Image (spheres, coloured by chain):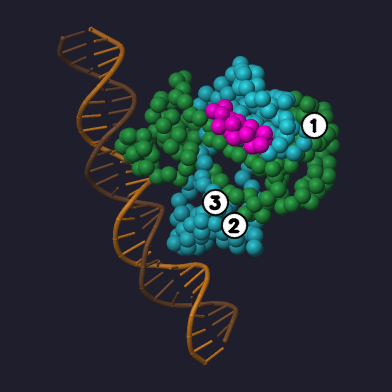
Chain colours: A cyan, B green, C orange, D brown
DNA sequence: GCCGCTGCCGAACGATGTTCGGCAGCGGTC
DNA sequence: GACCGCTGCCGAACATCGTTCGGCAGCGGC
């Protein structure tokens, strides 16, 4: 990861669909060079993929929440079972496994408050390992691409 | 947002860099039709953009945390001031404004635990409106694209 | 000083994005 | 019920882009 790799990542972060020619011109190398670097970044796993940023309200899911979940016992078996189950739910858009008073932070997007309530009291209580639940409504969610610095391994 | 729009979104979600021809073939329309639909989705704001999924560990920031922050007073002025300030920090990769006992959940990625500790006790305490801070280390962070259903407005 | 290696370049070719004219299907109107 | 206008899709044409590959310059080792 030299300065050129970092510069390419920075360019693609603002718009993952930018053409390779654009990126090459922006970082000051030939298109073939930028393409080879990008391919290597992908092969090395630095670039995992490119995801579409969709307006959740526009697709009928304007209400977001973060649901802190405590599972008992906090064993690997119970943690991984809940993680895999929760991750597959259609309402789930993100899942944090965390330290602290709770074990999970479940990020969900639903149609309205009623659907949120139903999700918490119907879906989550299905699982025997769920000991405690604490729901916070998300008023606003901002995302920011990470700042990329050259890293010499 | 009919079934065709939803299908296009679903195709692009798995890989935002998929070629338009691929998407068109997958949803069963001509490339020109898929292109026009995609352009409209972008114009309507349904597609906000495409972001690169970067391996944070590979770019030198393997430690993530969620920091719950309570600001006093919980006025619009204090909330928005902290939000704008926190959102611009280089460590920040996400920011939730939430209801509940705390007002913010700050998602940060740093080089190591020492940098995390320094961030909490040096950076966050700079702000007078920060009344309380509760840090949770993120062991694992899974993301999932939202399920897209046709929505008729 | 020579040699081999690595990384970048630029041209060539195939694939892709983008535009545009035309047409089919559908609703509304008289 | 026939006409008309509108909407959305298609496919061809052209510009742009991705991808490959031979070559070369710079650098480090022997």
Q: Is residue A147 above or below residue A79?
A: below
Majority SS type along the magenta span: helix
The disc, 2 or 3, on the residue closer to the chain's N-terminal end is 2
Q: Which residue is mark 3?
A: A47
Labels 1 and 3 positioned on one and the same chain: no
Identify the residue shown where x is 51% and y is 39%: A52
Crowd band around label 1 with a 10 angstrom C-alpha radius: few (<14), some (14–19), many (20+):
many
Identify the residue shown where x is 40% and y is 45%: B19
Q: Chain of mark 2?
A: A
* Distance in Å between CA atoms under marks 2 and 3: 11 Å
> Disc 2 vs disc 3: Cβ atoms closer than 8 Å?
no
Q: Chain of mark 1?
A: B
Image x and y of residue D17, in percent: 41, 52
User: In what element is the residue under mark 3?
Assistant: strand
Residue B125 appears left or right of A52: right
**Residue sitting nearer the eye, A43 or B88:** A43
Residue B70 — which label? 1
Residue A6 — which label? 2
User: In what element is the residue under mark 2?
Assistant: helix
Crowd band around label 3 with a 10 angstrom C-alpha radius: few (<14), some (14–19), many (20+):
many
Labels 2 and 1 positioned on one and the same chain: no
For the residues carrying marks 1 and 3, which lies nearer the camera in this image?
3
Residue A92 — which label? none
Q: Chain of mark 3?
A: A
Q: What is the magenta range?
A: A77-92
Does the segment drawn in magenta span residue A79? yes
């Amino acid at each position: 990861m030299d300065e050129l790799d970092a510069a390419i990542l920075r360019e693609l972060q603002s718009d993952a669909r930018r053409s390779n020619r654009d990126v090459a011109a922006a970082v000051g190398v030939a298109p073939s060079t930028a393409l080879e670097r990008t391919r290597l970044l992908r092969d090395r796993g630095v670039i995992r993929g490119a995801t579409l940023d969709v307006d959740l309200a526009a697709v009928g899911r304007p209400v977001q929440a973060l649901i802190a979940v405590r599972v008992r016992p906090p064993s690997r078996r119970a943690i991984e079972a809940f993680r895999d189950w929760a991750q597959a739910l259609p309402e789930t858009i993100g899942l944090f496994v965390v330290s602290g008073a709770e074990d999970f932070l479940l990020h969900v997007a639903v149609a309205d408050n009623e659907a949120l309530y139903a999700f918490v009291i119907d879906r989550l209580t299905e699982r025997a390992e769920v000991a405690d639940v604490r729901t916070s409504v998300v008023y606003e969610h901002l995302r920011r691409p990470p700042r990329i610095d050259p890293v010499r391994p």
